[in-house]
Image (spheres, rainbow, N blue to C red):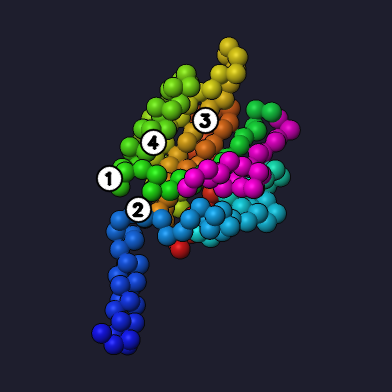
């Protein structure tokens, strides 16, 4: 085979592979976790990650970058933001996580993935308030589980973990606040997703 034919065939294979990515819902990661982490930047009150096309904007908040967060294997906490309002009941935290699809069976659905999250929470003795919760962010659907975390009797917070498959990863938004109703409000007001 001539060099020209080989090059043409290579370009065609790459083009077909790129077209197949949306059809498989991003089941195979295109980059390792260090590339995904490096695609994230904090600028003022906004975190953006160009690998996923995500932005998280939280005015007057404290950002903790990925270098200070847990990274293990093909998974990482990409960023965490803590909003400390003068009224303690208004405080909240948002963590964005990425977990490679390579860590799980190919046939795993997002419902299966969220089921695993739920079982881990149950093992920790946490109370599941809602399961299979659907939330749409900028037209992208995420499935979640809501947990009640009691710090002492009659005092605690709600934790919603909403996950979706994006670009070869399970991307999760972990939101913590004092009321279950605010979980999705915080997501819809602070997170935007742009097509890659």
What residue is shown with label 2? 27
Residue 181 painted magenta? no
Which badge, 2 or 3, comes first in the chain's sequence? 2
Give the extent of the magenta segment: 64-87
For the residues labelled 1 and 4, the Cα–Cα distance comes to 14 Å
> On the rendered structure, is 90 left or right of 71?
right
What residue is shown with label 1? 107
Q: Tell me if label 1 and label 4 are in contact, CB under 8 Å.
A: no
| Residue 142 visible in the picture | no
Marks 3 and 4: which is nearer the front? 4
For the residues labelled 4 and 2, the Cα–Cα distance comes to 16 Å
Q: Residue 114, labelled with which disc?
A: 4
For the residues labelled 1 and 2, the Cα–Cα distance comes to 9 Å
Q: Residue at x 47, y 36 (%)?
A: 161
| Residue in the foreground of this view, choosing between 149 and 15 | 15
Marks 2 and 3: which is nearer the front? 2
What residue is shown with label 3? 159
């Amino acid at each position: 085979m001539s060099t020209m034919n080989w090059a043409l065939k290579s370009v065609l294979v790459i083009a077909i592979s790129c077209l197949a990515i949306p059809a498989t819902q991003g089941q195979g990661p295109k980059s390792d976790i260090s590339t995904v982490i490096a695609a994230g930047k904090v600028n003022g009150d906004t975190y953006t990650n160009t690998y996923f096309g995500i932005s998280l904007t939280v005015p007057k908040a404290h950002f903790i970058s990925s270098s200070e967060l847990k990274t293990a294997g093909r998974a990482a906490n990409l960023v965490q933001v803590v909003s400390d309002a003068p009224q303690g009941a208004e405080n909240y935290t948002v963590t964005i996580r990425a977990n490679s699809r390579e860590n799980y069976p190919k046939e795993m659905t997002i419902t299966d993935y969220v089921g695993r999250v739920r079982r881990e929470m149950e093992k920790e003795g946490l109370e599941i308030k809602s399961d299979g919760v659907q939330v749409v962010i900028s037209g992208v659907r995420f499935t979640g589980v809501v947990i009640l975390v009691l710090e002492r009797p009659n005092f605690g917070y709600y934790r919603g973990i909403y996950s979706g498959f994006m670009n070869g990863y399970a991307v999760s938004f972990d939101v913590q606040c004092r009321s279950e109703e605010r979980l999705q409000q915080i997501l819809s007001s602070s997170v935007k997703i742009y097509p890659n």
